[in-house]
Structures are given as structure tokens and as C-alpha cells.
Image (tube, rainbow, N blue to C red):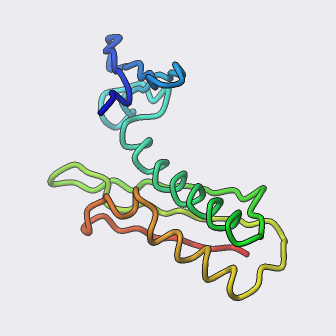
Amino acid sequence: MSVTSTLEYLGDLQLKATHVRSGQSFVTDAPVDNNGKGSAFSPTDLLASSLGLCMITIMGIAAQNSGFSIDGTKARVTKIMASDPRRVGEIIVELDFPPNSYSDREKQIIRQCAKICPVSQSLSADLKQTVIFNF
């Protein structure tokens, strides 16, 4: 088993995350509603964004394997916080697909991918996942 990432606390509620294999890095910040400046993704922003990223990645794999394309697909991710305890209560992923005249079978494949992506499967059943498909 190898290390996935390294994290370094920079101070002032900011951290640097580095992906070990690629060397790519980014900085996070606490959100404004939790003592931060909101100058970068917060950890909960990344959690919400990871859901959309994973869904589209799995859709891309399935599309390649099935002979169609989702190139140009875009998404808007909305994170809704809950309290007692403070946590992400809902993630809304709205997916906009290019005008490719997808068949009913292709749409079914795409919808199924949203349900089976590893991030979706890893999140608590208490976290509401709302997915909107705009074909």
C-alpha cells in the first residue's frame, strides 16, 4: 500500500495537499462560515466536488466502453451544510450533457453510473445525494 497524498498545515486554517504520484498540489482554506477566509476549496467543498468528479469519471469510462461520448459534459455542484453535528447534509449535482441525441440505453447507462460511482457508494446513507440530468 502506498501513500496517496501528503498534507501540510500552512497556518491560518490553510493546508497544502500534494498528490504523491504526480506531485500536483493545491491549498485548502476553512470556509467563511467556519472561521476561514474562503480563499480556496474547503475540505467539505472537496467532498462535494469529489462526488460530481467521480460520477462523471465513471460515466466517461462507461461511455468509452459503450461507444458513445460525453465529452463536454459540465456539472454544477451545490453543498448544503447541516448542523448538530456540523456536516454536509446534501450534495446536489446538476449535470449538463452536450446535445448528442443520447439513446434511451445510453441515458440509462449514464444514470446508473451516478449511483455506482465509488464516492457515492462511500458516503453515508444519511447524506442526501440529489442528481439532476440535463440531456
Where residue 106 sits: x, y (%)? 69, 80
The one of 125 and 122 positioned closer to us in this rendering: 122
Corner quadrant of residue 96: bottom right
Quadrant assignment, res 133: bottom right
Residue drawn 35% across and 21% down? 6
| Left or right for 82, reference 39 | left
| Front one among 14 and 135 | 135
- Residue 99 located left or right of residue 55: right
Q: Is residue 32 above or below residue 125?
A: above
| Nearer the observer, 79 or 43 | 43
Q: x and y percent of residue 67 in the render?
A: 76, 70
The residue at the point 65 percent across, 60 percent down is: 60
43 w.r.t. 66: above or below: above
Q: Nearer the viewer, residue 11 or 62?
A: 62
Relative height, residue 43 to residue 130 (above, below):
above
Extreme residue in the top direction: 10
In this image, 10 relative to 116: left or right?
left
